[in-house]
Image (cartoon, grey):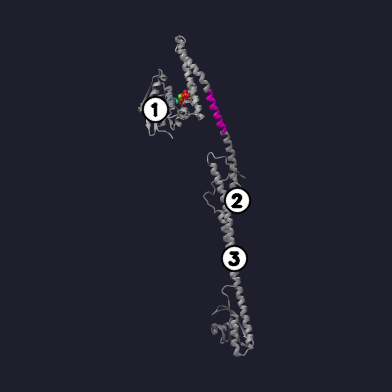
Amino acid sequence: MSNRPPRLTERTDERPWPLVLLAPILVAIVGIAVATAIGALGLSQLADATTDRASIRAEWISTLLGERISKLDPAVRLDAIQLAARRTGAEVVVVKDTGDVTLDATLGAPDANALKEMVRAGHGEATTMMGRTRYAAAALPSDAHVFVLSFVRIPRAPEGAPALVQALLALTTLLIGVATVVAYSVARDAKMDISYVTTRVSVMAVEKSEPAGERVPVRTIDEVGALTSAFNDLVSRFRTAELAYRRDLTRARAADKERAEFLAAVSHELRTPLNAVLGFADVLMSEVDGPLSADAREEIEQVRQSGAHLSDLVGDILDFSSLEGGKLVLSRAPTDLAAMARELVKESAVLVLDKPVHVRTEGADSLVAFVDPKRARQIVGNLLGNAIKFTQSGEVIVKVSLDRIYALIEVKDSGPGITASDQSTIFEAYGQGKGERTKRRGTGLGLTIARRLALMHGGRIELESALGIGSTFRLWLPVEKQR
Ligand SMILES: Nc1ncnc2c1ncn2[C@@H]1O[C@H](COP(=O)(O)OP(=O)(O)OP(=O)(O)O)[C@@H](O)[C@H]1O
Ligand SMILES: [Mg+2]
């Protein structure tokens, strides 16, 4: 036997009749058909029995009356047959075998030919003024040529028919009623189970909901039951996976928090001695402790530069860890970003040193935005620092302009450009371009911090770069107060 998985697409376009509807309809149709057949058979048998009874009565009346009037005086015979007709509810006529009427106790006797024929036949069915009747002829014992002919009406509805019809109607109603109740309860149960499953699935689909491991009680062994138990299997798997995921997430969060706390603690510890080193270097440079030789000056300058660089790195790590730990809070104030750009360009002279790189500003003279001045300066300073660091010759332009509700600050350089694969990683923590990683300068945190600070402001940073031509970093910061 092959282990072929079930074809899920099978029969999806066919819409089979729901069994819940079909079953009671079938029960009702079969029930009504059987009841109708029983009714028709019963009614025809009842009708036959009623006709037979009328025939017997007609024969009995004719025979008895024949015997009676034979013994009577001809003058009183008419009274006798009229009395008998009244008492039995039959029509009676005394005829000769030629069809001539001798005595008549009918509502209107048939004509002579018909009477003659009836006498000849002896018994049969005829229609008189009373309606459908059975008739019987009996010869008088005293005269074989004279006959008593009596007509007994056949009732229009066979006797017992109303009772039969009532019983059948009751049976049919009961059948349809039971079928409806069964169908209703099956449908209701199925609907309840399915809507319960649907609700649980929707609850489970909501993000951040509690683990939904509640099983649905399996109430039936039909398709709904199969669906429910399949759902229960799914719930078990889902619950196991969800619990594992939550456990991993909690662990990861704890690890992240620990790492951020460790980084913060270490950088804080580094900062104090570093400040001492920088402070003492400044003291030595100011020559309060005595004059310095040219070599000593150069060496102390080295100490100062390295110390400052180290201080920057420690500052980045501290910022990053407080961003990671969600501890960094912005303090916004109206800030002139154009003025800030001019200051940064001015200060950047120490970064350019003797490289043939021209740094300048462009765009608006003044553009006030409601941002954290220290952090905005940090972002733009970072972008500008990178542009100058990676550009060996040419120019670096900082342009400030208004873009709808944002202040747009573009930092454009004529540096080496950034490859497509590097563009996708440099905004990640510790992400540096391929060349930069081997040189081991910087931490690779600058852009990560810049992007996160921009996002915290409700802004963003985008990069456009072409190898060999240069890069443009665009920073958007909202001008208005953010809610
Ligand atoms: N203007 C630019 N031109 C070319 N490459 C750039 C430019 N700016 C950034 N990069 C690339 O992106 C990488 C990440 O920059 P980022 O500022 O995050 O780190 P870094 O400058 O290497 O180190 P840090 O800023 O921590 O001192 C850089 O290493 C460099 O490869
Ligand atoms: Mg940098």
How many angstroms separate mark 2 from mark 3 (CA)? 33 Å
The first of marks 1 and 2 along the sequence is 2
Q: Which residue is mark 3?
A: 168
**Magenta part of the protein: which range?**
250-266
Q: Which residue is mark 2?
A: 222
Q: Residue at x 53, y 48 (%)?
A: 12
Q: In which quadrant will I find the C terminus?
A: top left
Amino acid at the residue labelled 2: Asp
Q: Is residue 253 magenta?
A: yes
Q: Which SS type dominates the magenta stretch?
A: helix
| Vertical position of residue 172 compared to residue 321: above or below | below
Q: Vertical placement of 159 versus 396: above or below?
A: below
Question: For the residue labelled by badge 1, is the local secondary structure a helix, a strand or a loop?
Answer: helix
**Cβ–Cβ below 8 Å for labels 3 and 1?**
no
Alpha carbons under labels 1 and 2: distance apart: 71 Å
**Where's residue 116, x and y in %?**
57, 84
Q: Nearer the viewer, residue 469 or 233?
A: 233
- Badge 2 marks a residue whose secondary structure is loop
Check disc 1 and report the residue beneath it: 337
Q: Are marks 2 and 3 in contact (CB under 8 Å)?
A: no
Where is residue 138 drawn, in percent x and y?
A: 62, 83
Q: Residue 377's mark?
A: none
Is residue 14 or residue 89 the one in the foreground?
Answer: 89
**Viewer-nearest of discs 2 and 3:** 3
Mark 3 belongs to which amino acid?
Leu
